[in-house]
Amino acid sequence: MTKILIPYYSSYGHIYTMVKAAAEGAESVEGVEVKIVRVEEFDAVKQAMSSQDAYVQAQEAQKDVPVATHDDLRWADGFVWGIPTRYGSMPAQLKQYIDSAGGLWMNGELEGKATGIVTSTGSIHGGQETTAITSLIPMLHFGMIYVGLPYGENTEQMTADGIGGSPYSASTVAGPDGSKQPDERDLIMARSLGKRVATVSKKLKA
């Protein structure tokens, strides 16, 4: 089996919804096993956000998702990362998870593995492209092979309707208050990316 890991962080559930769609896409490829894991929240953030009902409900919905470990990274043949934007780049929770995996970098354990990104922002110009591009940098240091989302396979990207999507990642727009849920076209792109990463990972493993 080709093993696809989907590590993600999600405050309000938008990325969680998107990575579940990416998992569906990956699972549509024969001979692929998928595991979704969540990057653990900081205690300080839990405290600061505990008065927000939307945050509390989203965290409750994710409580049964296994917490990501470095052994999960070793297990995988390919990755789809669920990365929301924080001021145009990945949030500190995910950065810490990646930064603390220096032993895997030193030993080259993630080299040659396919990787793709799912992201979300509060607005159309809130960092969808910069988050994907800046997140790519540490992945290249680990020796991963980046898989994008070409226009030829995803006509959903060729719109001006305020949905997500770019050649760099599958994405969604959550709205300034987080009330806008992923559009079905966003989910189509997430499924497509999951399928692409699984297909490339399977070929690389072979």
Image (cartoon, rainbow, N blue to C red):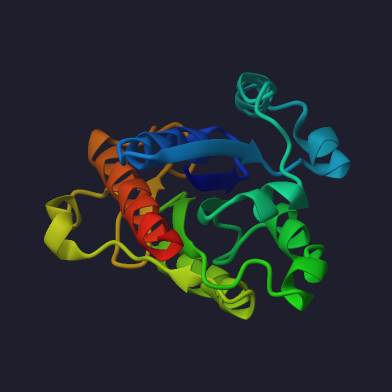
- At 45% from the left and 60% from the top, the residue drawn is 205
Residue 159: tell me if it is visible.
Answer: no
Q: In the image, is residue 168 above or below residue 2?
A: below
Residue nearer the viewer, 59 or 72: 72
Query: Quadrant of the rendered structure where residue 135 is?
Result: bottom right
- At 56% from the left and 37% from the top, the residue drawn is 35
Query: Quadrant of the rendered structure where residue 90 is?
Result: bottom right
The reply, left or right, for residue 3 in relation to residue 92 is: left
Q: In which quarter of the image is the C terminus?
A: bottom left
Query: Quadrant of the rendered structure where residue 20 is?
Result: top left
Residue 127 location, x and y as percent? 47, 64
Residue 93: tell me if it is visible.
Answer: yes
Residue 89 location, x and y as percent? 58, 66
Residue nearer the viewer, 197 or 60: 197
- At 50% from the left and 56% from the top, the residue drawn is 78
Residue 120 location, x and y as percent? 46, 50
Residue nearer the viewer, 151 or 29: 29
The count of marks equals 0
Residue 149 location, x and y as percent? 29, 61
The reply, left or right, for residue 32 in relation to residue 55 is: left
The reply, left or right, for residue 112 in relation to residue 110 is: left
- At 68% from the left and 55% from the top, the residue drawn is 74
